[in-house]
Image: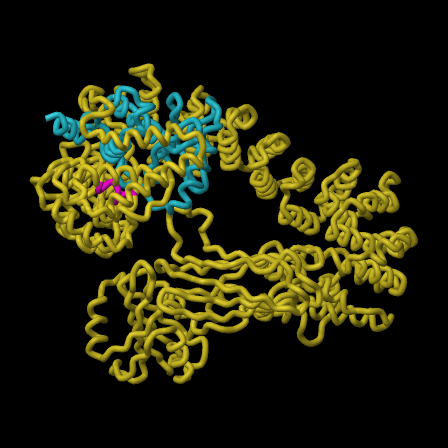
């Protein structure tokens, strides 16, 4: 299963974190710093899967944004790797430009992520279904 | 598309976020946040009632602050208020806050539960989804109690919306994982399996996660999912890329769903039904075929999605391990990936091939890729890929390619990353030993290993090479020659000096004929390294010198000269000084015969526990020791050579064992071996030697004794403390550990007393408590026991005692005991002791008194087979009534009188208190005095508890 999803900028600041298994607040910062160190300094030709403690990190980066997913053994690395891309495509579709607005629309990014992953499991991959609640919300706001 | 800030965009929040983003330093950020927190606090405390919008805005700010990594200790109540709002945005922020911030034992749960209940019955699908998300995220026991009955109903009801079904499935999964006892199987279970047939792919995707988890726990009940999964998979695999429009990802139909289906099938053995199996094999073949087809898109997303399915299919093929044809095809496919330009694919292919190598059908096929893998080890730029390549080489190694693989791994070691060297060294050592046909190759390999990566060669590795050389006559001469050559290097690793000293001390005579390695040359060579070595190595070398005196009388004068020098005989290190004094005395007083006996060549080491018997029989010849006696001897150690009259044979073996030092250095490791167990009688022999000559004797004795604990074995130790809380936990020549403990409910406090039995200070004294598997399990999964302690003082003076307090909290039931590791330096040598702490599940018992009727009523309630654990066993101790009663009381339960109709029987009741739950336990012990047997029955609401208690108690009576 998926343990957590992190969105981190190039400076290593966490922009979004979602944990699917409880981690104490005090340990989160250390974990995030560690994870980011593990991924940020990797070169392009190195592989996108990093062993970290007893689980794996799958990461992908877009311009100055890194997305890191922690997974257990029971998850397929490549499918998670593409899941990240799918997530970015959905964000792209909704916000047209992904990178900057994340901080301003954290609630919406959370809604999108929650539609795709619940409890550490993939539940929905279809773009329009993922965006359905948000679209409903927007029509509501405009009317 | 909506603009970034809209009507409900909460301007205040946007401003705040901009401020934070513009902060130049951490301090400025903290200042800005504290200002905002003060503002929000005053708003929440103010007299004016806040409207929904403001509440939402402030809660959202708090959430943002929390996500930046600052703790939030207020606002929960306001968030809960938002839950009952009718506006989606307000409700959503409320739920988000609670999902992220509220932990499962908050006192707000009751209020939250109320709001959830309202939303679940609202029939508004978006509200229902929010509520279900929240349960899934918090997942506390109280929530499970409130909703575990309701959610299966929502999940399988005909009129539930698809999106609600998806959330309900994941919600139920969470509840089942957190509180399986509350999610009762029932009529819904069969209908859940049929969700695999649901029209909506999203529902299937969500349901599979639930079904996979349920099938892992109850495989039989969910067996029907196999055929359904196969038919679903088959429909996806055979569909054209346009069929599943919404769920096609870069021309690949439903990649995530396919992966999950293949993963679900890995919970089961191959389908028995021929038709189903045929269909599945067809699917797998199609997937393998598609990999060979030209890609439908040049995009990397396309090939990644396709390969995700392919790797999952290969995992399934490996899991079945029954279709040679598919296995070989999988291997060929992976072989192609080994040379792919995508690093990710090379990495995954190496990893997957590692598991394939262990299948008998594909082992040969995997071996054909050896050159590619070796190349990967040499040329990959990413260390994690190289690591995989090394793993694969290890996995594919067998007798036919061992020499090549070991050679490649050795040459890789010269440049290997520090992070993986130690593991590589062990792997090389294991392979070299496992596949050695020719032991000179083995010796070369290990010596090379020490030369190349000496720092990473652990003691076990060099002990092992010595054991093998000692045990095999045919390699001894070669070994002596090789170490002699290796020691010629101007700088050689200390481990090499150790091996060299040991081997030349034993077998230097085999190469002494050659003038280039005459005795004196050998000695000078060894002695030239002496000053560069640490104390333990010097001690070993001194022993090698005394062995030289025996092997080559012509070196006696030179060596005595060395021993007599101030730097030896007055060395500040006690151990070295003692050896120098004793060896000098021994060499000058003892006659050649005595010397030859004492310093005789080492006897072979026992190969393994299991082969000790055969080896002894062979060595002693038939009839010397009856087999039964040998078996006793194996258990009791010292018995073997201790009893009655001994022929010259056993006297010799005794003297062998006590050969002063090198044996002590090596045997210290293997306390169970009978050779070292002969130490006491060996001691008496030495006493004779020395009483004749009137020299001091005590320290020499210590050399041959190893530091094995005087206490019973570790598991026995655990058993000893099941029914009592105080006593001596451990004792050896150096250290005694006393223990005192007390328990209340799910908490315990344990006092450990470390007593230094020697007159010398222990330095760098440190203790660590760990729970087995702690390293593997990550912080994300809590351990069943929480043990807190403060470090002890690093110095323990001679004769002193230090105390350490452990606070123990039982989170959930457990079967492994925590481990205590103690490290300290004694006279320069590092001592390392690992013990199990006697913390067992019964320590958290609270006694429960109850009347006979209550007892039997509860007994009947716990009648499911998994709730009961039973054992029938022979009495290990006397069957005295009072002793039994004392033990049962010591256990922590209440001993119930006048309950069992048979007065001979004992019944007890208690509750195991853990933080997460309380488990009621009933116990019945039925002695049969005639047969000297007991029957022990335990019933509790949790199967693991019954089982563990039964195992623990069966050892007690």
- Quadrant in the picture for residue B657: bottom right
Farthest residue, direction front: B47
Colour yellow belongs to chain: B
The image quadrant where one finds the C terminus of chain B is bottom left
- x and y percentages locating residue B655 in the rendered image: 75, 64
- Foreground of the two, B47 or B136: B47
The image quadrant where one finds the N terminus of chain B is top left
Is residue B911 found left or right of B194 in the rendered image? right
- x and y percentages locating residue B208 in the rendered image: 23, 39
Residue at figure coordinates x 12%, y 38% from the top left: B125
Q: Indicate the colour of chain A.
A: cyan
Is residue A61 found left or right of B620 in the rendered image? left
The magenta span reads B94-100
Residue at figure coordinates x 61%, y 70% from the top left: B626
Residue at figure coordinates x 18%, y 42% from the top left: B50
Residue at figure coordinates x 23%, y 53% from the top left: B108
Is residue B850 found left or right of B117 in the rendered image? right
- x and y percentages locating residue A99 in the rendered image: 33, 23
Q: Is residue B770 above or below residue B732?
A: above
- Foreground of the two, A92 or B713: A92
Dominant SS of magenta comes to helix
- x and y percentages locating residue B52 in the rendered image: 17, 40
- Quadrant in the picture for residue B454: top right
Residue B691 colored in magenta in the image: no
């Amino acid at each position: 299963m998926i343990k957590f999803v992190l969105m981190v900028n190039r400076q290593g600041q966490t922009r979004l974190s979602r944990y699917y298994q409880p981690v104490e607040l005090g340990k989160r910062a250390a974990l995030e710093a560690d994870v980011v160190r593990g991924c940020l300094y990797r070169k392009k030709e190195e592989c996108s899967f990093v062993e970290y403690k007893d689980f794996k990190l799958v990461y992908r980066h877009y311009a100055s944004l890194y997305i890191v997913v922690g997974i257990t053994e029971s998850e397929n690395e490549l499918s998670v790797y593409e899941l990240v891309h799918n997530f970015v495509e959905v964000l792209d579709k909704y916000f047209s430009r992904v990178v900057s607005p994340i901080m301003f629309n954290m609630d919406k990014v959370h809604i999108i992520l929650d539609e795709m992953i619940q409890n550490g499991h993939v539940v929905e991959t279809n773009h329009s279904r993922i965006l359905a609640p948000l679209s409903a919300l927007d029509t509501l706001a405009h009317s | 598309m909506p603009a970034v800030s809209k009507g409900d965009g909460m301007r205040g929040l946007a401003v705040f976020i901009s401020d934070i983003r513009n902060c130049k330093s951490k301090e400025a950020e903290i200042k800005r946040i504290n200002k905002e927190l003060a503002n929000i606090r005053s708003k929440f405390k103010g007299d004016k009632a806040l409207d929904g919008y403001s509440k939402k805005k402030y809660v959202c700010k708090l959430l943002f602050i929390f996500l930046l990594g600052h703790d939030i200790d207020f606002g929960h109540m306001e968030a809960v208020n938002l839950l009952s709002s009718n506006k989606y945005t307000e409700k959503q922020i409320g739920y988000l806050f609670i999902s992220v911030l509220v932990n499962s034992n908050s006192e707000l749960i009751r209020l939250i539960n109320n709001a959830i209940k309202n939303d679940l019955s609202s029939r508004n699908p978006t509200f229902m989804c929010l509520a279900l998300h929240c349960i899934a995220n918090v997942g506390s026991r109280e929530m499970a109690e409130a909703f575990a009955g309701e959610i299966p109903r929502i999940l399988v009801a005909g009129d539930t919306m698809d999106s609600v079904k998806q959330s309900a499935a994941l919600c139920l999964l969470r509840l089942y994982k957190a509180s399986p006892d509350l999610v009762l199987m029932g009529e819904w279970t069969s209908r859940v399996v049929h969700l695999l047939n649901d029209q909506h792919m999203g529902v299937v995707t969500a349901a599979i996660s639930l079904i996979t988890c349920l099938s892992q726990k109850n495989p039989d009940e969910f067996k029907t999912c196999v055929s359904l999964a196969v038919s679903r998979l088959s429909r996806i695999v055979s569909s054209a890329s346009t069929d599943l429009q919404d769920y096609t990802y870069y021309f690949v139909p439903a990649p995530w769903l396919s992966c999950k289906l293949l993963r679900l099938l890995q919970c089961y053995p191959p389908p028995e039904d021929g038709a189903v199996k045929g269909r599945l094999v067809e699917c797998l073949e199609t997937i393998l075929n598609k990999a060979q087809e030209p890609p439908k898109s040049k995009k990397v997303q396309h090939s990644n999605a396709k390969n995700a399915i392919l790797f999952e299919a290969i995992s399934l093929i490996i899991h079945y391990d029954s279709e040679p044809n598919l296995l070989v095809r999988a291997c060929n496919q992976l072989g192609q990936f080994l040379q792919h330009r995508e690093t990710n694919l090379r990495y995954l292919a190496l990893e997957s091939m590692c598991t394939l190598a262990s299948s008998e059908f594909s082992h040969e096929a995997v071996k054909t890729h050896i050159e590619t893998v070796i190349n990967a080890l040499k040329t990959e730029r990413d260390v994690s890929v190289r690591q995989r390549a090394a793993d694969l080489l290890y996995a594919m190694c067998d007798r036919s390619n061992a020499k090549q693989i070991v050679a490649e791994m050795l040459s890789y070691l010269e440049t290997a990353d520090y992070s993986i060297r130690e593991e590589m060294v062990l792997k090389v050592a294991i392979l070299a030993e496992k596949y050695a046909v020719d032991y000179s190759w083995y010796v070369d390999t290990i010596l090379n290993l020490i030369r190349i990566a000496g720092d990473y060669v652990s003691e076990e590795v060099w002990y092992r090479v010595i054991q093998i050389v000692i045990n095999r006559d045919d390699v001894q001469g070669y070994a002596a020659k090789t170490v002699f050559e290796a020691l010629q290097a101007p700088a050689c690793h200390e481990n090499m000096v150790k091996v060299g000293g040991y081997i030349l001390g034993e077998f230097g005579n085999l190469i002494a004929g050659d003038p280039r390695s005459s005795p004196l040359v050998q000695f000078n060579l060894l002695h030239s390294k002496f000053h560069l070595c640490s104390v333990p190595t010097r001690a070993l070398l001194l022993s090698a010198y005394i062995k030289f005196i025996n092997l080559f009388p012509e070196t006696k004068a030179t060596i005595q000269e060395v021993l007599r020098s101030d730097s030896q005989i007055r060395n500040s290190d006690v151990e070295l000084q003692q050896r120098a004094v004793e060896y000098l005395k021994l060499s000058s007083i003892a006659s050649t015969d005595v010397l030859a006996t004492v310093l005789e060549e080492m006897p072979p080491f026992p190969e393994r526990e299991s082969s000790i018997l055969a080896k002894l029989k062979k060595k002693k010849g038939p009839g010397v020791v009856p087999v039964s006696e040998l078996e006793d001897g194996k258990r009791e150690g010292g018995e073997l050579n201790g009893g009655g009259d001994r022929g010259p044979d056993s006297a010799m073996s005794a003297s062998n064992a006590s050969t002063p030092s090198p044996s002590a250095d090596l045997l210290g490791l293997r306390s169970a071996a009978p050779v070292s167990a002969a130490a006491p009688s060996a001691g008496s022999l030495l006493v004779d030697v020395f009483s004749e000559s009137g020299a001091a004797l005590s320290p020499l004795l210590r050399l041959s004794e190893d530091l094995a604990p005087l206490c019973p074995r570790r598991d026995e130790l655990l058993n000893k403390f099941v029914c009592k809380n105080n006593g001596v936990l451990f004792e050896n020549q150096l250290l005694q550990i006393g223990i005192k403990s007390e328990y209340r409910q799910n908490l315990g406090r344990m006092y450990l007393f470390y007593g230094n039995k020697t007159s010398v200070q222990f330095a760098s004294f440190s203790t660590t408590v760990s729970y087995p598997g702690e390293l593997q399990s990550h912080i994300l999964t809590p351990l069943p026991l929480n043990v807190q302690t403060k470090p002890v003082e690093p110095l323990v003076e001679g004769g002193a005692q230090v105390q350490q307090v452990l606070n123990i909290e039982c989170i959930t039931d457990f079967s492994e005991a925590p481990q205590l590791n103690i490290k300290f330096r004694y006279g320069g040598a590092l001592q390392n002791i690992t013990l199990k702490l006697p913390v067992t599940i019964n320590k958290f018992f609270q006694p429960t008194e109850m009347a006979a009727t209550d007892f039997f009523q509860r007994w009947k309630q716990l009648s499911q087979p998994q709730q009961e654990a039973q054992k029938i066993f022979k009495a290990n101790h006397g069957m005295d009534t009072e002793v039994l009663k004392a033990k049962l009381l010591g256990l922590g339960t209440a001993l119930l009188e006048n309950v069992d109709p048979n007065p001979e029987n004992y019944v007890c009741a208690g509750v195991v208190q853990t933080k997460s739950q309380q488990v009621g336990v009933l116990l019945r012990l039925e002695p049969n005095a005639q047969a000297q047997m007991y029957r022990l029955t335990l019933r509790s609401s949790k199967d693991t508890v019954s089982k563990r208690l039964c195992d623990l108690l069966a050892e007690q009576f």
